[in-house]
Image (cartoon, coloured by chain):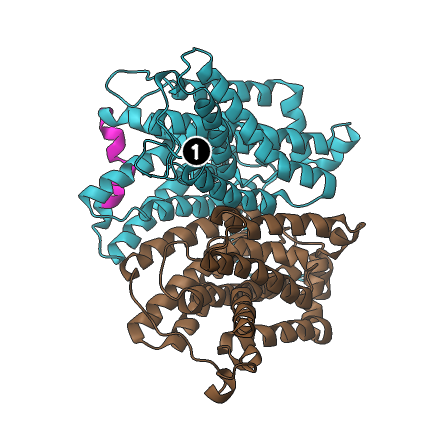
Amino acid sequence: MRIRLEPRKAPSRLALYGAPIMAIALTMLAGMVLFTLMGFRGGAAVFEIFIEPLLEPQRWPDIAVKASPLVMIATGLAIGFRANVWNIGAEGQYIVGAVAGTGVALATYEIESAWILPLMLLASLLGGAVWAAIPAILRVRLKVSEILTSLMLTYVALQLLYYLVRGPWRDPEGYNFPQTRMFSEAQTVPNLLEGTQLHWGVPLTFLVVLITWFVMSRTLLGYQVKVVGLAPMAARLGGFSENRTVLMTMLVSGALAGLAGMIECSATFGQLTPQFPVNYGFTAIIVAFLGRLHPVGVLIGGLALATSYIGADIAQTASALPQAATGLIQAMMLFFLLGVDIFVINRIRIAPCVPRLAS
Amino acid sequence: MNFDIAISIVMTLVVAATPILLAGLGELIAEKSGVLNLGVEGMMLVGAVAGFIAASLTGFTPFGYAVAALAGICASLLFGVLALTLGSNQVATGLALTIFGTGLSSLAGAGFVGTTITRLPALFPPTLAGHPLLRLVFGYDVIVYLSIALTFAATWFLNHTRLGLILRSVGESDASAHAIGYPVTTIRYGAVAFGGALAGLAGAYYSLAVTPMWADRITAGRGWIALALVVFSSWRPWRLLLGAYIFGAVMTLELYSKAAGFALLPPEMLAMLPYLATVAALAVIAMRPSRGRLDAPRCLGKPFRAGA
């Protein structure tokens, strides 16, 4: 008997949509084993991470708030990944978006106007797009891989943030803490539901998902992105410019990451602080894959990852599971997903061992 | 006095360059076989934490390095199973490995923050290693000499051995190599595992020699710089060494100007320098007319399946 993989004639839809669920199930199983081996209550911890947040309705708004930036960033990244554009520096664009928006906020300090917040959000879109434009232009002009350059710029963005909050932007009345002034009410993303963390960034993310879904599945532009990713040669023959696609997908993903950064900064922190970037830009990569690079899938994937964040907080108090376990759980999800994905285009064949001529 | 400082600066430069050179050499061999493993940073972190734990528990630092190399191999095999056996997307798998290594290392290392270990001593006797001038050549630990020896070895292996030729042919044209009868996947596994071992060592060099202590994310993105330097070197070991030493110089500049307190630039701007320099280096190397692309192994990053 030998087990081997055989290519399918057509990709299996069941495997395509079942793979993320399978990956989460396998992660839960592996997490249980791993945490038990490390001396924690493995079963309880996994239950707290994946199930408990869903059972407690008072945590649902928290899940939505947590999912919002992840979904917003991942929606943009997924567009690029479809076109084989690997922007992995979303974390940096997220930071620069918040920096640009905060710049507007600090410049309009003590001005009361309904235009300030929209202006801040616009600035964050531009900030994120500009930061993504650097690797995009290097790729288009010089064929430099955007993978490495976009990632390098994340470290630069982080230092830029540190410099600003320790230096020129430090709150003069802030007892020397490295952070900016608190945003005024006109500069804060308004709350949506009294008594919860829910803010207007959540429906905005939902809107972004809807628009992206429409553009990707119902317009020529979306078709162009998919063709460039799946069949670059056909795209060239069809007159679709690869360079323009690279530029566009990079700018869009950068802009969305920047917007997510500003919303998170304003709604959750109310000021720019060095604590505000927490690797959402990297987690969003997992969300994009878990969501099958489809806007609606990304929405579901984002909710799943957000649940694991909230759940990890529960497990931290209930089972003394360290914060770092979250990162491990997320990475395992991606690992298992990539492994299970093999069954989308292949099937397992168990065949008797017959000597083959061409080996 | 000034002379003494100059010597110290050069020595710091060499120490800063060594882990980048090691990790880069490992990745260079893997890429020559056609595999793009973006998990270097993750493998380095796994090696750094495993090496530190082993060294602090046994009190024997060489054992730490051995464990680090082994841990790096284990991490790289995780990548191998997914990317080589199951044929998953190499970019995504490498990223997953980096996220995994980051999480695993901070989880495993949490209990070891504040623990101290002893560094490896200089390889040569104190008369040479402590000599005011000769220490420039003889004042390092064995890992530094190992990294230079491996640069020699990698050049010789790739250009003058049969196995090196086969490895390159696998990276240039996997289908032809397979048709001739070479075990493409096995060779790639070997190259990836070698990359893992060196990344593990490189990571441990941070936790056991450069810093030496455990801190979360101790490698601070140096694995990505090593990846970029492989491109910068056009997949040639000696150019990789040159690149690593240039970066060692940039990082040393950051370190010394911070210590000396001269405020040419704010410290945050200095900390940006290695990353900005990497972007600049990648751009400059790409400007050479059509060379850069021709140097890359043809099958880099493409999954291979026999008979598919």
Q: Does the segment drawn in magenta span residue A55?
A: yes
**Residue at the left extreme, as displayed:** A318
Q: Residue at x 64, y 30 (%)?
A: A226
- Give coordinates of residue A340: x percent, y percent: 47, 45
Q: Residue at x 40, y 28 (%)?
A: A264
Q: Does the segment drawn in magenta span residue B17?
A: no
Instruction: Judge from the rendering whether residue A149 lies leftward or rightward of residue B262; answer left or right.
Output: right
Residue beneath disc 1:
A169
- Give coordinates of residue A174: x percent, y percent: 32, 33
Q: Which chain is brown?
A: B
- Give coordinates of residue B49: x percent, y percent: 38, 62
Q: Nearer the viewer, residue A74 or A142?
A: A142
Q: Is residue B40 above or below residue A43?
A: below
Q: Colour of chain A?
A: cyan
Q: Residue at x 56, y 82 (%)?
A: B134
Q: Is residue A322 above or below residue B158?
A: above
- Three-letter code for the amino acid on which mark 1 is drawn: Trp
Q: Sort mark 1 into few (<14), some (14-19) or many (20+) by Cα contacts within 10 Å.
A: some
Question: Which stretch appears magenta?
Answer: A45-57
Q: Nearer the viewer, residue A27 or B295?
A: B295
Q: Chain of mark 1?
A: A
